[in-house]
């Protein structure tokens, strides 16, 4: 008995000694500094950089939002609920709040960096948004979201926890891209299967249509996304005509550019479209896994990205939003993230 106890104690002392030696060696070992990732810029040196990579967001923690006490307590009682992007399709930034439409999560993620809060916005009684595909910045912090499966448009108020239906007095087939005119309160809704853009007044009355099916100027073949500039110009990705068309604030055709192809500046599966403060036009192309940039005349300027999972690479990207400070948000759909870039160059 004594010998067995002595052996056990000797073994324990040996283990403690080894642990102590290991800790001492670890403390004495030289620390290898972690190398910061190199700045990612487009175009590559020695050309003058115009776009800079900033960061990637997949979950609230990536944007500095940590779980509060009540959420941590709920995780203990009901099991951890890891909030993260599943299949982000569109993104909008409004006054320090990032909204991401996500059909995979059946809702809209709201990352509030001002208050450090995160919410998954759905309908009343936690009913899902089965196919939220586009977002638009509204007035007074509102955000509009289109759901192509429900064939409706909803609004998320600044302080609301749910999305509320917008009373549009017209039947929609497959609403996709949306844009809002803050001056007139008009709402532009792309109806993909109807091949036109609906223009609704502030009370939801249908004022007019832009387009109709065809290949002529001002006509569409399955349009998808839309963007409105502060000056009132509208850009529409005309999907199966493989072009982007622009219109004035009254819906009159201005210009079109683009062609089907697999070369630089060609289009294959164009999705989101946006412009920066210099008038550059950014087009997300899911087939190329890239974002192409054009000037106002449709002249190709620069391409960002390629297929992959690293910084600045994409896998079937879709939506894009550009803030007033030229920060660029890209919904990198099948990489389950939003990548954030910024235009840092001069006007071209």
Image (cartoon, grey):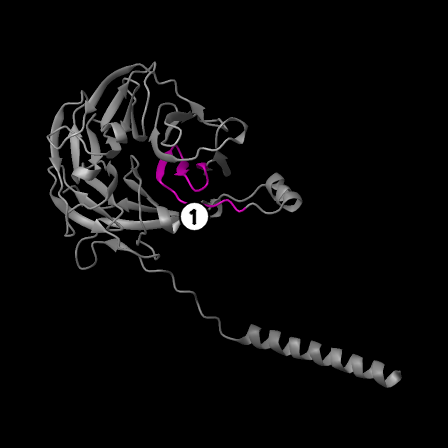
Q: Is residue 1 left or right of residue 25?
A: right
Residue at coordinates 18% horizontally, 31% vertically from top-left?
220
Which residue is disc 1 drawn over?
Answer: 58
Residue at the image position 12 percent from the left and 33 percent from the top: 215
Question: In this image, 249 relative to 36: left or right?
Answer: left
Tell me which corner region of the image, top left, top right, bottom left or bottom right, holds residue 15. Answer: bottom right
Residue 311, quarter of picture: bottom left
Question: The C terminus is located in which quarter?
Answer: top left
Secondary structure at badge 1 equals: loop
Q: Is residue 219 above or below residue 34?
A: above
Count residues near mark 1 (Cα–Cα under 10 Å), then give few for <14, some for 14-19, many for 20+: some
Q: Which residues are magenta?
A: 82-110
Q: Residue 97 lies in magenta, yes or no?
A: yes
Q: Quadrant of residue 47?
A: bottom left
- Closer to the camera in the image, 215 or 337: 215
Left or right position of 206 against 86: left
């Amino acid at each position: 008995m004594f010998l067995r106890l002595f052996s056990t104690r000797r073994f324990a002392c040996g283990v403690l000694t080894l642990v102590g030696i290991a800790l001492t060696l670890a403390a004495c070992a030289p620390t290898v500094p972690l190398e910061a990732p190199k700045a990612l810029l487009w175009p590559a040196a020695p050309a003058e950089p115009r776009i800079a990579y900033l960061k990637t967001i997949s979950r609230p923690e990536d944007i500095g939002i940590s779980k509060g006490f009540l959420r941590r307590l709920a995780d203990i009682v009901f099991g951890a609920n890891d909030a993260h992007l599943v299949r982000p399709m569109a993104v909008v930034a409004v006054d320090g709040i990032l909204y991401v439409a996500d059909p995979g999560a059946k809702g809209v993620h709201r990352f509030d960096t001002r208050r450090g809060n995160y919410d998954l916005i759905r309908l009343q009684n936690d009913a899902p948004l089965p196919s939220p595909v586009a977002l638009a910045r509204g007035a007074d912090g509102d955000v509009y979201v289109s759901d192509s499966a429900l064939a409706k448009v909803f609004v998320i108020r600044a302080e609301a926890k749910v999305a509320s239906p917008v009373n549009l007095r017209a039947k929609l087939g497959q609403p996709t891209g949306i844009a809002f005119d803050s001056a007139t309160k008009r709402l532009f809704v792309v109806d993909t299967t109807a091949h036109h853009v609906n223009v609704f007044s502030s009370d939801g009355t249908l004022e007019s249509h832009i387009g109709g099916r065809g290949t002529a100027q001002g006509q569409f073949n399955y349009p998808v996304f839309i963007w409105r500039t502060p000056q009132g110009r509208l850009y529409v990705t005309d999907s199966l005509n493989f072009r982007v068309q622009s219109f004035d604030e009254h819906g009159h055709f201005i210009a079109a550019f683009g062609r089907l192809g697999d070369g630089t500046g060609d289009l294959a599966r164009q999705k989101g479209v946006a412009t920066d403060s210099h008038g550059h036009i950014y087009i997300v192309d899911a087939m190329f896994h890239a974002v192409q940039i054009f000037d106002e005349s449709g002249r190709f300027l620069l391409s960002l990205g390629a297929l992959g999972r690293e910084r600045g690479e994409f896998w079937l990207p879709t939506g894009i939003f550009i803030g007033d400070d030229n920060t660029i948000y890209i919904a990198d759909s099948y990489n389950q993230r939003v990548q954030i870039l910024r235009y840092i160059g001069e006007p071209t």
